[in-house]
Amino acid sequence: MPTRVRKAVFPVAGLGTRLLPATKSIPKEMVTIVDRPLIQYAVDEAREAGIEQLIFVTGRGKSALVDYFDQAFELEATLRDKGKGLEILAPSNAKFGEVVTVRQQRPLGLGHAVWCARHIVGDEPFAVLLPDELMLGQPGCLAQMVEAYDRVGGNLVAALEVPDSETHKYGVIDPGTSDGRLTEIRGMVEKPAPGTAPSNLMLPGRYILQPEVMNALDAQETGAGGEIQLTDAIAKLIRSQPVHAYRFEGERYDCGSAAGFVIANLAVALQREDVAPTVKAFLSR
Ligand code: G1P
């Protein structure tokens, strides 16, 4: 049985420029999907998969994210005085020591953000979740991956098919043989030039990685867009460790853009018993 995955890294230092002006003063991860900030969905997904430590790689202007997972005594007292329940706050109250933060002082790429967490991750496997990508599944994407990881170990990346016209926006895998939802990975490329992608299986931002990926990132080599890319570091492991893609069963919503946010809001609203009837009635008008 491979070593259990207890820690998850959430790269949340990005400026969120595609969601300006909202993100001028709030982190994009705090923008809401129905009534919960985007980060809550990724954290719920991680907890469901058995993650015990949430490592936020933050930057300037991101303290609202850390405050969100703190206990709000005044708010709780006020709710109590009004005879209101506190259950609504439960998912946002981190356990003691559950949240750890580290700063990425310069935006040098996703690989660099993950590398900034190396001393907290230490010598054990860890997950990475990109909160912009809202993954809805039963069970969630990371829980599905942990189940597969318990069988094959090594490194696992979620993979999803996209139209050929979109592969240049993502990390893309060169697939080998498949066994059910698992596919062996022969190579990976970050943001391939249009028409050159090895497949249309893209990386939607969920990873289970071995600590050796941090050694690959030590080199600080830059790749696509002049950034230090996580995809390149994982590709380097292929020679020495198993690297598999896991085709996740569920839906993915890219909340990196305004349209994506609106679509994700609708998708979640239509799944919520309390909100769906009103939203459905509006949409059918
Ligand atoms: C990052 C990763 C890329 C992945 C994408 C998913 O790219 O580098 O491999 O496919 O997230 O959203 P970014 O969107 O930060 O450019």
Image (tube, rainbow, N blue to C red):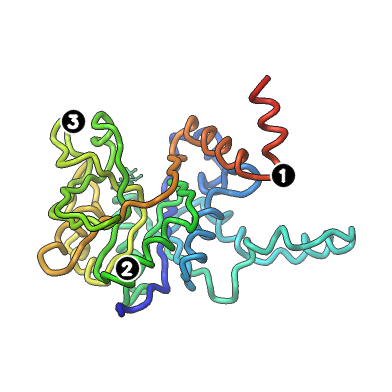
Label for residue 128? none
Q: Which marked residue is nearer to the observer: mark 3 or mark 1? A: 1
Using the image as rendered, state which of residue 204 and residue 65 is in the foreground.
Answer: 204
Whole-number angstrom distance, CA of label 2 to CA of label 1: 35 Å
- The percent position of residue 280, horizontal first and vertical second, equals 66, 30
Whole-number angstrom distance, CA of label 3 to CA of label 2: 32 Å
Quick check: can you spot residue 273? yes
In the picture, which quadrant includes the C terminus? top right
Q: Secondary structure at mark 1?
A: loop
Give the residue type that dot 1 points to: Asp
Using the image as rendered, state which of residue 255 and residue 181 is in the foreground.
Answer: 181
Using the image as rendered, state which of residue 135 and residue 22 is in the foreground.
Answer: 135
- The percent position of residue 138, horizontal first and vertical second, equals 50, 55
Q: Which residue is mark 2?
A: 149
Give the residue type that dot 2 points to: Tyr
Q: Secondary structure at mark 3?
A: loop
Q: Which residue is mark 3?
A: 194
Label for residue 274? 1
Mark found first going from the N terminus, 3 or 2 = 2
Mark found first going from the N terminus, 3 or 1 = 3
Tell me: 16 left or right of 63: left
Give the residue type that dot 3 points to: Pro
